[in-house]
Image: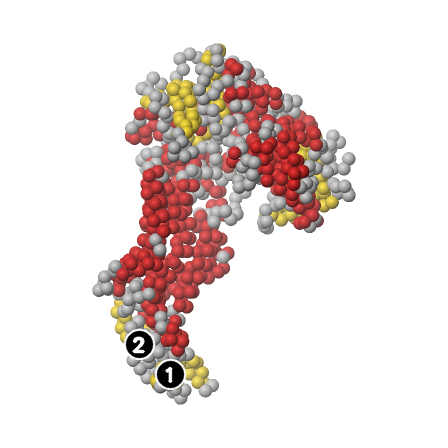
Amino acid sequence: MTALLKVEGLTIGFGNAAPVVDDVSFSVDPGETLALVGESGSGKTLSCRAALRILPAVAQVRGGAVMLDGPDGPCDLMGLTERQMCYVRGNRVSMIFQEPMRSLSPLHRIGNQVIEVLRLHGTAKGQGARKRVLETFERVGFKDPERIYGSYPFELSGGMRQRAMIAMAIVGKPDLLIADEPTTALDVTTQAQVLGLIKEIQHETGMAMILVTHDLGVVANMADSVTVMNRGRVMEAGPAPLVLGSPQHGYTKELFAAAPMIPESSEQKAKDDGRDYILEMRNVSKTYTLKGKAPWHPKEHVYAVRGIEFGVERGKTLAVVGESGSGKTTCAHMALGAEWADPGAEILFKPEKGAEAVNLQELGSADRLAFQRKAQMVFQDPYSTLNPRMRVKDALCEPMEIHGLGTHGERIERATEMLRWVGLSENMLTRYPHAFSGGQRQRLSIARALMLGPMFLVCDEPTSALDVSVQEQVLQLLEEIRDRLNLSYMFISHDLAVVARIADEVAVMREGLVIEQGPPEALFYSPQHPYTKALLAAQPEPDINRPIDLQTVSQGAGKPTTWPEAFRFDDVTIPPLLETSPGHKVRCHV
Amino acid sequence: MTTLPDGRYIDPKPYEPDTGAEARHAELDMPNWMLVWRRFREHKLGLISGLFLLISYVMLPFAGFISPYTANERAPDHLYASPQGIHMFHEGKLIGPYVYPISAEVNLETFSWEYTPDYENPARLNFFCEGSYYKLAGFIKTNRHLVCAPEGATIFLLGADRLGRDVFSRILYGAQLSLTVGLVGISVSFLIGIVLGSIAGYFGGFLDWIINRVIEILRSLPELPLWLALSAAVPSHWGPVSVFFIISIILGILDWPGLARAVRSKFLSLREEEFVRAAEMMGAKPSRVIRKHLLPNFLSHLIASATLSIPAMILGETALSFLGLGLRAPAVSWGVMLNDAQNLASIEIYPWTAIPMLPIVIVVLAFNFFGDGLRDALDPNRA
């Protein structure tokens, strides 16, 4: 069989620098899925873009051929004119991008954007084209294609937009679909459904696919063959079962070792009674009031968090898991007193065991400053968490400066010590943040949080922007520091595998409510709630024999009103959080 | 590409795990201003303009020394004298820089002054000579000039105006006011713009609303009549220096809304950055957050936008003075000089009276190129 797309010896570079894609070769057979796996900066996206000749203007292709097989034999895409290339794009090869928010034009209706593909290529016109678009909409799982046709991107959720993107990509019936991290920006349950959809469509139409991803779990679920890239070179390539089953190359092995996984066995930990909470949230709600559509309309209320009751134990980690919009970040902000909860809430902070608890809701400004010394936050985005105009030295010393602690010398001394703790060297003190990689910046951010000697840290998705291998290192560092300083963490995450590793207790949130809470063993091995089950089922595992169970995902991933009777809730009736077994709580009707 | 029998390929190069020691290059350790300077150097037009502006401003205190005459020194016999060239060779002989003395005559048909050079008696220029008294840099009283007219001759490089004053000298003296009016005005507008803009952007809410409405009202007023009204309110008996300050402050007061808006929108976006949140959660007070985190992050952009708005100030001063409502004689500025060129007829006969337009055009262009170059160099979106 001739390969549909064959990339040979592709070399791409910027300016005079060494090539960023170096002698890369891969090929896709018709109907097959090739996964290009690698961490950020490995050159996987550039290689794909080179195939469609949509590289940034400053990138130069220094060598190699991209052969696309067609009715009249293979032809080299590098040698085509721009006009011929336009025919190839969208008609024979199409692409899905990572950010569904940004890849659709906000000013045009979805239908118009999709029909444009047909119009540009002259494939279909008028009513015929419209019919074909509507059919495609139905194909990608839109219940009401007519309504989607006339709606604007902002009316759709992330998952819906990605479906619309898929519709746009497949409406021209291409032979090859290039999907560049199509699900990275989506919630895990949505990701599972979108992946399922792509697979189904591929099965039906027999189109080939190049899937660019960093997630080995996605690869295991989707790919027939795998190409692993690192620093612009192909490290290992071959059929998926072989590469995933017994990786040979050092880098591939490392990548697999770093991939977080929900552990197989469930070891029950001994439960000690009389929990000593460092931070306890009781009856915490947060309602945002929005202006109505017009002055005479009533104001709208958004219930970001509804009646949270949980606590972080001293020296332990409480993980809060949920999809975007579930209220977990609001929770984190309230736990640090950065946002006020609705009246009636109690957020109790107990600095020492047996000490008087202070209610964050009633703190005066002096007490607040004292509290801020003991509770700090680690942020999500390593690129915006450090001020680009401040040297590392200044950024690290800033907390002590704000609190007026120590002399200049003492601050520097402490900063040096903290740098050593997080595994960076002290000669980095005079550098600016732009000299650091994502992982190093997250280390700096942790070092800054430790400067004041806190006892409670809130980590808001500290690893979600990092590569797997770096994520592993940062998690290790967090664990190390927790044990060394007896810190307590509130760990916000959307990734169950990360949580499984670090948490002592897990709370799963959905629409501002905790729907299930318990120790990770209980939660992961006997999940009670359909949403928890869906989350677990949707988690892609880097094991080719454990595909995503779409049935379970679809049962729990929908709106809370579609859940089974016992768990259903809406704005009015909310079932209570019941303790089903010691320490394990589920929100269900009795 | 070597493939194993089972269809897989393994990179033959020995693999070294990434130790996290990233490739070091000097650029990473550079402070921001050095990176900006390196990018700015690439922008040749901006660089040249910057140099020109630097020289112009450095020259200001020494304007009196460079110019052969003082600003209001009259040559009653040389009204509307035409520009004189400086020559080196006289009848094939090098005698150094010299001018031909000119003598005036009234053409009774056109009723205009006509000048005839005396080609017989070349007059060599004097250097470092003594002329009229002026104050160097505003303090040191001296009468030393770089160059002055020889006995019995004049040196009007760009001609003389209707009172027989040297246009070239007056342009140099005028630069002292015209170039600094922009700086004073921009400082005023910066002060107001940054303070109000940051309050609006950082605190939001009602304050933001008030400031925005003030901006909108100020922007809705027609600019020229407002200038006129404000400058008409300046008492006419005030000295030239106080009028100058009032004019620049008026220009500044009317210029700040644009800047305040830029500051506000920048604040709104920067406030969402995590490092700002981090500082707030550490307990930093608003003033500290603004000073340490927000302002440094876009001060460079402010500087660029300031460079781009100085020309507007210079043009504003010129426009006001041209209309006779800005600076008034005996103060010398480019606008005041152009005020003399209001008469179309006199421009037709003595075109050199309109020459002060030239430095205005050049300086405004230079500021624009310089600001453009700065903005490009500071643009973080450029990879």
| SS assignment at label 1 | loop
How many marks the image carries: the answer is: 2
User: Residue A542 in the image: x percent, y percent?
Assistant: 61, 26
Closer to the camera, A215 or A284?
A284
What label sits on residue B163 in the rendered view? 2
| SS assignment at label 2 | loop
User: Residue B332 in the image: x percent, y percent?
Assistant: 31, 68
Q: Amino acid at mark 2?
A: Leu
Please give the name of the residue rendered at 30% of the width and 56% of the height, measured from the top-left corner.
Answer: B249
Q: Quadrant of residue A279?
A: top left
- The residue at which mark 1 appears reads as B110
Query: In the rendered view, does A263 fall on the left or right side of B100?
Result: right
Q: Amino acid at mark 1?
A: Thr
User: Disc 2 sits on a residue from what chain?
Assistant: B
The answer to whether residue B209 shows anywhere in this view is yes
Neighbour tally class for label 2: few under 14, some 14-19, many 20 plus, Cα within 10 Å: some
Which quarter of the figure is the N terminus of chain A placed in?
top right
Please give the name of the residue rendered at 28% of the width and 69% of the height, measured from the top-left corner.
Answer: B329
